[in-house]
Image: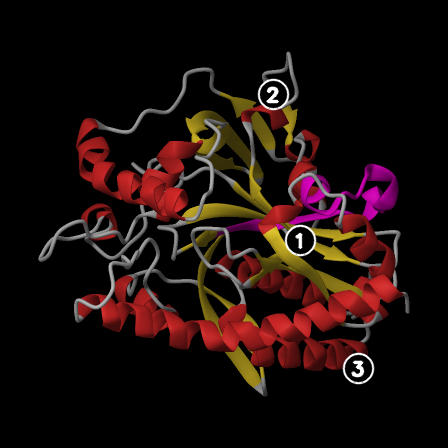
Amino acid sequence: MSRAFRRRISSAVVEDVISYCIPIWSTARVLLGRLGFSRLKEYSFLRLKSRELWTFYKKEPSWMELPYGDGVRAIPLVVAADWTANQNEVTRVQVTRKDDQFELNDWIKGFTDPAIQAYLEFLKERNRPEPRPDLNLRIASWDEFQGNTKIQLQPVSYFDHIRTNLTIDYIHKPGGYCLREHVHKDHRLESLGRTSLADHLGIDALLFSVDGHLILSRRSRRLAVTVGKFGPSGAGALKASDFPKFRKRVALPELNLLRELFEETSLMESDIDLDRVHILGVGRDLLRGGKPQLFLSVPSLLTADKILEKWESAETYWEHKNLVPFPLGKLALNDSLSKEELRKLRGKLSALIARHLQRMTEPLLGALAMWWYERKNAVCR
């Protein structure tokens, strides 16, 4: 075990202690503010907890589940597409691009102006630059016919994503209501391709080392939401530039789905077992208003030690406090499992969930759920 690897483990322990202290400090700041002893503002960009999300979206029928002790635990995501049983289905997913950019309606623009201003103020207080005006891709339409899926993607502004998905719970005046209560007043999500939110397509890549570690990231405290929590090593959004140039139609695997992972870890294609990268499916994150997340399983050819060493030179390393390896064993990498091997793997995953559930982002939970569905499908019959 190298010195760099030991340093990362020590850093993770320190981070654990800090994570337990932050809720106490945050509560104290809010109470002081309400008593008039502090000018610090409370921001509620994403405020609903799992139980509140279950109550709000009570009409949603299919919740994702993860192993938890002797049973399973529901998590606040719903399945939009599950390709874990048959990877051949992924190659039949055809993706086209729509040229015109998505525009929010005037009412949502006006309603969300206070929220976006609060977000920009939040960044300024923390000496953070404003986000780049990137163009991401959203799902403009989703059609399934005779076992084939056709998806149309459309450029959308990253600022519109902040307006509608990251500040969906922001209430800008006492007695007011938030955007979530307006667009989902019937306690159901709008269907994919017909939503009024920006809903850009998220990318969440679970990274596994060749020696059987799941490599997770600890989100930087410079970020606006879910700070200090564990997330996938590669997490972000599909950009307009990720669609191959000069082409109008591609198969789903032809999109540049690993860009976020490479930017955030400094890994390259030569570090990845590309033949075993699996596109697991699409889930909808209820915390972010049903924003679609595309989940990937990515096996590396490097050990956890080497992955952590490369991370320090990553292009967007600042988004992570650190990378943390969790040993699941080489069973996590097997293409097929016996029932006994699945039982052992379930125990390790269940222990990981039980210990860190409250410090995991919703996209990470969704990615783990889809990966677990795939592992169950890999059992030898």
| Residue stretch in magenta | 261-283
Q: Which element is circle 1 on?
A: loop
Q: Which element is circle 3 on?
A: helix
Badge 2 crowding class, 10 Å Cα cut-off, few under 14, some 14 to 19, many 20 or more, is some
Question: Given the image, on which type of amino acid does mark 2 rest?
Answer: Arg
Among all residues in the image, which is located at the extreme front? 37
* Relative image position of residue 16 (x, y in whole percent): 59, 74
Badge 3 crowding class, 10 Å Cα cut-off, few under 14, some 14 to 19, many 20 or more, is few
Query: In which quadrant of the rendered view does residue 191 lie?
Result: top left
Does residue 49 appear in the picture of this structure? yes
Q: Is residue 263 magenta?
A: yes
Q: Is label 1 or label 2 in front? A: 1
Left or right, 163 with reference to 273: left
- The disc at residue 249 is 2
Q: Is residue 64 magenta?
A: no
Does residue 336 appear in the picture of this structure? no
Please name the residue that numbered disc 1 is placed on: 233
Q: Is label 1 or label 3 in front? A: 1
Please name the residue that numbered disc 3 is placed on: 340
Q: Residue at x 54, y 64 (%)?
A: 229
Determine whether label 1 and label 2 are within 8 Å by CB: no
